[in-house]
């Protein structure tokens, strides 16, 4: 059946909390990133029109998550990489790994090509950060490395120590330097975008 944005947010929060539980158990550091970080700081929860969830982590923590965390995810969450689902390979330049809700699926509109994947449910994107050799103290992920105009460069000192922020009533880790980072990402990030840009994308999730 059709699910509305509130139900989609509820399911995405479940993805995030499940990921958080595993990371805490194994002392794996991560932080809310991109639109999810913006949502935590500006809305104390999801941006009302956002349809996915973003987290970031260092490569070393991702390796630990692969070793100890993936096998402990709930059965209704699929860990999606080019290895677990080869059809994801063309998108791996954008994001290396995702957690997918097994009980939903994004249904694109006529303008958006469908992803030819078995698991296309609501998602939590994992952005994996490495040292960026071109800039001192800079980190970058596959998305930023492949889109030259998007070289935002998270600084190591912004995530060396993590703070927490309230997101949908739950505390989650955020970069200690979130203000400078969000300013680089979005400019005046505390100001809402124009009304016409606050639309839920024409992508509908259906339960399956």
Image (cartoon, rainbow, N blue to C red):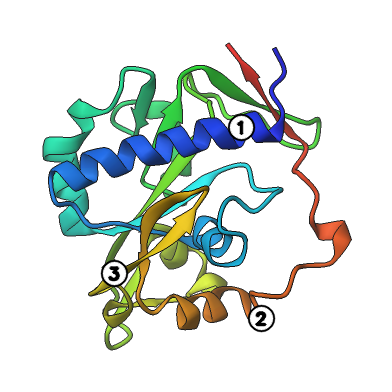
C-alpha distance separating marks 1 and 3? 27 Å
Q: Which mark is residue 141?
A: none
Does dot 3 land on a helix, a strand or a loop? Answer: strand
For image coordinates 45% across by 66% down, the residue present is: 144
Q: Which mark sits nearer the N-terminus, 1 or 3?
A: 1
What residue sits 37% from the left and 39% below the top?
17
The reply to whether the C-beta atoms of the residues labelled 2 and 3 are less than 8 Å apart is no
Query: What residue would you read off at disc 3?
Result: 162
What is the spatial separation of the Cα atoms under label 2 and label 1, in whole angstroms?
27 Å
Q: Residues within 10 Å of mark 1 (few under 14, many from 20)?
A: many
The percent coordinates of residue 81 (x first, y second) are 34, 35
In the rendered image, the quadrant that contains the C terminus is: top right
Indicate which disc, 2 or 3, sits on the residue closer to the N terminus. 3
Circle 3 packing at 10 Å, graded few (<14), some (14-19), many (20+), is some
Up/down of 44 relative to 176, above or below: above
C-beta proximity under 8 Å, tags 1 and 3: no
> In terms of depth relative to the viewer, which is nearer, 23 or 96?
23
Write the residue at 65% across / 75% down.
190
Q: Which residue is mark 1?
A: 8
Q: Where residue 18 sits in the image (x, y, percent)?
A: 33, 35
Quadrant of the rendering where the N terminus is positioned: top right
Q: Is residue 85 visible?
A: no
Q: Counting other residues with Cα less than 10 Å from the Cα at mark 2, is it few (<14), some (14-19), or many (20 or more)? A: few
Left or right, residue 74 beside residue 147:
left
Residue beneath disc 2: 188
Percent coordinates x, y for residue 33 in the rendering = 45, 60
């Amino acid at each position: 059946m059709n699910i509305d944005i509130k139900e989609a947010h509820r399911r995405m929060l479940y993805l995030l909390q499940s990921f958080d539980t595993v990371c805490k158990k194994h002392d794996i550091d991560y932080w809310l990133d991109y639109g999810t970080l913006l949502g935590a700081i500006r809305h104390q929860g999801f941006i009302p029109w956002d349809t996915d969830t973003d987290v970031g982590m260092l490569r070393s923590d991702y390796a630990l998550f692969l070793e100890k965390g993936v096998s402990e995810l709930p059965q209704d969450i699929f860990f999606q990489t080019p290895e677990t689902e080869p059809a994801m390979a063309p998108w791996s330049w954008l994001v290396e790994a995702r957690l997918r809700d097994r009980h939903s699926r994004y249904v694109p509109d006529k303008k958006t090509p469908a992803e030819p994947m078995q698991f296309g449910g609501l998602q939590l994107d994992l952005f994996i950060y490495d040292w960026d050799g071109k800039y001192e103290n800079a980190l970058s992920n596959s998305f930023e490395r492949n889109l030259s105009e998007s070289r935002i460069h998270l600084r190591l000192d912004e995530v060396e120590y993590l703070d927490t922020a309230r997101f949908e009533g739950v505390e989650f880790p955020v970069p200690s330097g979130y203000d400078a980072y969000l300013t680089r990402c979005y400019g005046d990030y505390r100001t809402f975008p124009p009304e016409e840009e606050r639309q839920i994308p024409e992508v509908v999730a259906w339960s399956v």
